[in-house]
Amino acid sequence: MSLPAGWTLSASAFNLTPEVIRAERTAPDLALTLVERDIASTIEIELGQMWRGFPAPPPADGDAFRDRLAAAGGRISIVGVSIDEYDRGRRRTDAERRAFLEPQLRASARVGAAGVRLPIGQAGALLDDLVPLLEELDLVLFEEAQGHETPVARPAAYDRIGELDSPHVRLLLDISMLMPALPVTYLEQLARGGVPADLVRRLRDEWREPATHDAVVDLLRSGAVPGPVHTLYMDLLVRFGRSSVAELASVLPLIGATHLKFWDLVDDDDRLSDPLRDVGAALAETGFTGTLCSEWGGQEWLDDDPWEMTSRHLALAAAVFSDRSPCVPPPRASTP
């Protein structure tokens, strides 16, 4: 089974967040398991999750992880970084924002990453000034768009990437933007949490209808969203998108990496494989090269084994992108 030339499947250490929180093993040790268990040889990491001292982790810690990763046959594709916009309630100036970000860029280069990732538009006024530093460090800044952050919703942010026309600033597309239907297990969680049955039905059968979005907002404004699922409910407005690939046609050439966001592995009606198939076909048309990273978002409400979930999802993605008949592989025995 072979992928198109220049395409690399990868796995995100973010998928192991529940294990990081458990703290039975360190975050670097856990990230390494993705390579050690032959799940992926290319991984993404979250800098703030890996080492103490954020935003300027100790160089020795990064060096040790880089060497251990290389010894295991792995490498880092992208590092998730961030800009803390406030300092004790006071909004940071642009100079302070850059001072917060720069050590993260240097740490990412030190561990051998090809790029770093920020939410689309967050760099803002820093973007022009960051390009020389990105060139010096040989890093790509990927601006990530997900959920409802379509070109229509964020035109200026997308336009800025195109205007810069730099190989060091690219778009990262999260396919949560392209959901034809909501995750089955998510809908079950809303129903158990007390969300009205009629709205759950509409979310199940009419997710992409504008009137369904209006109904979601109406319930939120009414204050009637049940407390136990209030945080999950907000995913409908932030993390879950309703767009099609056709709506992204103008920005497809800007894409340098992709997050293959998934929530569960229920794919009876191709709600999981269709976005993979659609984005794969679209990227192939543009001559895309880069990483396509498995990122599991369902840990918010599921307690499944994250290694197993990631492994099975990558097998599905490999099948779709290789033009094989896709199906979600059955669970395999967990590696101790």
Image (tube, rainbow, N blue to C red):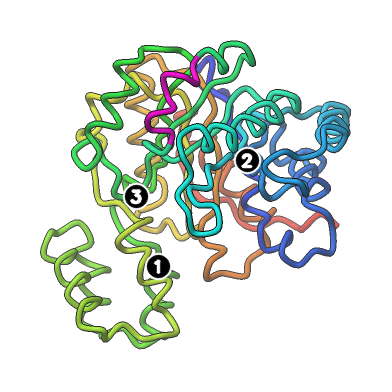
Q: Quadrant of the C terminus?
A: bottom right
Q: Which image quadrant is residue 181 in?
A: bottom left
Q: Which mark is residue 142?
A: none
| Label 1 sits on residue | 184
Q: Residues within 10 Å of mark 3 (few under 14, many from 20)?
A: many
Distance between the alpha carbons at the discs numbered 1 and 3:
17 Å
State the residue in front, 34 or 313.
34
State the extent of the magenta-drawn residues as a range: 123-131
| Label 3 sits on residue | 147
Query: Residue placed at 40% from the left, 63% from the top?
Result: 183
Left or right: where 173 falls relative to 87: left
Q: Earlier in the sequence, mark 2 or mark 1?
A: 2
Which structural element holds mark 3? Answer: loop
Q: Residues within 10 Å of mark 2 (few under 14, many from 20)?
A: many
Type of the residue with mark 3: Gly
Type of the residue with mark 1: Val
User: 216 above or below 109?
Assistant: below
Distance between the alpha carbons at the discs numbered 2 and 1:
23 Å
